[in-house]
Image: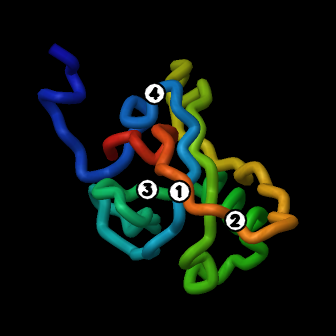
């Protein structure tokens, strides 16, 4: 049994992403009480779990989307990746935010395509 299955969380964890690198669209940003602190939580289109933002990830989104105003983040696309970080003297998996790959502008009218299995299939 996976320990994370025994202790489900309403917030996204690195184990929810695994080795994937999903590109997600920001649906909402809220301020919620987590433990004894108020934290920014970013929610994504089509996903149930929100990501608790730390300063590193909030700054990454600000850099990628060009605004520190969370209202301007709505509809923005970011890529989620896992990375090993030092936390309380231990090396642990964490979620980090990167800029998604830019897609080239189409030179002709795009044709409808079947949805391909990919990062959007990650079940968080």
Q: From the viewer's perspective, is residue 46 above or below residue 7?
A: below
* Residue in the image at 32% along x and 42% along y: 123
Q: Nearer the viewer, mark 1 or mark 2?
A: 2
Q: CA distance from mark 1 to mark 2?
A: 22 Å
Residue nearer the viewer, 116 or 6: 116
Front disc: 2 or 4:
2
Discs 3, 1 touching: Cβ within 8 Å: no
Closer to us: 104 or 78: 104
In the depicted structure, whether residue 83 falls above or below residue 98 = above
Name which residue lies at 39% across and 30% down.
15
Q: Is 112 displayed left or right of 104 in the figure?
A: left
Q: CA distance from mark 2 to mark 4?
A: 32 Å
Give the mark nearest the N terminus, 2 or 4.
4
Secondary structure under tag 4 reads loop
Residue that label 1 marks: 24
**Image quarter for residue 5?**
top left
Q: Which residue is mark 2?
A: 110
Does residue 52 appear to the left or right of 58 in the view shown? Answer: left
Displayed quadrant of residue 22: top right
Above or below, 123 against 37 in this view is above
Helix, strand, or loop for circle 2?
A: loop
Q: Which mark is residue 52?
A: 3
The residue tagged 4 is 18
Q: Secondary structure at mark 1?
A: strand
Sort mark 4 into few (<14), some (14-19) or many (20+) by Cα contacts within 10 Å: few
Determine whether, in the image, residue 3 is placed left or right of residue 70.
left
Tell me the crowding category of disc 3: few under 14, some 14 to 19, or many 20 or more residues within 10 angstroms, Cα based: many
22 or 82, nearer to the observer: 22
């Amino acid at each position: 049994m996976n320990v994370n299955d025994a202790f489900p969380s309403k917030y996204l964890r690195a184990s929810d992403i695994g080795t994937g690198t999903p590109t997600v669209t920001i649906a909402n940003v809220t301020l919620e009480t987590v433990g004894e602190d108020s934290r920014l939580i970013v929610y994504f289109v089509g996903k149930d779990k929100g990501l608790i933002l730390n300063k590193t990830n909030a700054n990454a989104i600000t850099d990628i989307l060009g605004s520190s105003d969370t209202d301007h983040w709505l509809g923005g696309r970011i890529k989620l990746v896992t990375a090993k970080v030092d936390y309380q003297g231990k090396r642990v998996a964490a979620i980090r935010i990167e800029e998604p790959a830019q897609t080239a502008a189409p030179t002709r009218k795009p044709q409808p395509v079947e949805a391909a299995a990919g990062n959007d299939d990650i079940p968080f």
